[in-house]
């Protein structure tokens, strides 16, 4: 079931996000986040009117997705960056696609112009999903990140909303 996240869901969201910090290059953070960090993040999303969606299955949060400011400057006010994270045991069920599709619909309804995705270049399933949903490749930033004792390339993809 796809629904809007509530504050009580943050414990699940935190668990999913921290898993990716520890075990993947999907996010280039090194240090785990705590509940204080997540509550501020949640409050900021709500204050700005950005969606924070979750996929719930059998009472468990299986994934979350959101979008937010690309950059905090006026000239970028029509440009978004999004994030979707799916708990590993729920991969391959179309949950990420459902979340991203809903985020795109929400952003289009709110008249945003473009949504960007910054994806670790080694994350082929994410790149393939973005292509499937109509994102185009903008480029690759070589050695943009560093994690697990190696440099990582970052793929930039863009969805351009039509009027």
Image (cartoon, rainbow, N blue to C red):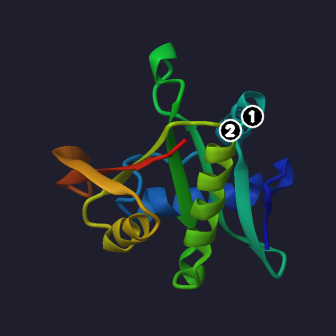
Residue 126 appears in view: yes
Check the picture and name the quadrant holding the C terminus: top right
Q: Quadrant of residue 22?
A: bottom left
Residue 64 rendering spot, x and y as whole percentages:
65, 60
Residue 30 rendering spot, x and y as whole percentages:
40, 47
Describe residue 117's horizontal placement relative to residue 49 as left or right: left
Residue for point 82% across, 82% down: 58
Residue for point 39% across, 57% down: 135
Residue 61 rendering spot, x and y as whole percentages:
73, 69
Look at mark 1 in the image and give the residue it sits on. 49
Residue for point 41% across, 46% down: 29
Check the picture and name the quadrant holding the N terminus: bottom right
Q: Residue furthest top?
A: 74
Which sits in the foreground, 115 or 40? Answer: 115
Look at mark 2 in the image and give the residue it sits on. 110
Position above or below: 2 against 70: below
Position above or below: 131 against 67: below
Q: Secondary structure at mark 1?
A: loop
Question: Label 2 crowding class (10 Å Cα cut-off): few <14, some 14-19, many 20+?
Answer: few
Residue 82 rendering spot, x and y as whole percentages:
52, 48
Circles 2 and 1: CB atoms closer than 8 Å: yes
- Nearer-N-terminus badge (2/1): 1
Question: Label 1 crowding class (10 Å Cα cut-off): few <14, some 14-19, many 20+?
Answer: few
Describe residue 52's horizontal placement relative to residue 94 as left or right: right
Describe residue 27's horizontal placement relative to residue 84 as left or right: left
Which sits in the foreground, 29 or 153? Answer: 153
């Amino acid at each position: 079931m796809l629904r809007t996240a509530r504050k009580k869901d943050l414990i699940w969201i935190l668990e999913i996000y921290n898993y990716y910090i520890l075990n993947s290059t999907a996010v280039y953070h090194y240090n785990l986040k705590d509940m204080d960090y997540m509550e501020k993040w949640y409050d900021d999303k709500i204050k700005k009117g950005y969606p924070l969606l979750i996929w719930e299955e059998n009472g468990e949060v299986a994934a979350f997705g959101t979008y937010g400011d690309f950059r905090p400057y006026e000239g970028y006010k029509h440009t978004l960056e999004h994030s979707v994270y799916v708990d590993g045991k729920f991969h391959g069920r179309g949950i990420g696609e459902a979340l991203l599709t809903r985020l795109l619909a929400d952003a289009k309804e709110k008249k945003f112009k473009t949504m960007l995705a910054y994806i670790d270049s080694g994350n082929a399933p994410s790149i393939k999903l973005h292509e499937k949903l109509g994102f185009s490749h903008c480029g690759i930033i070589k050695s943009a990140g560093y994690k697990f004792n190696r440099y990582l390339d970052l793929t930039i993809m863009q969805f351009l909303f039509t009027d």
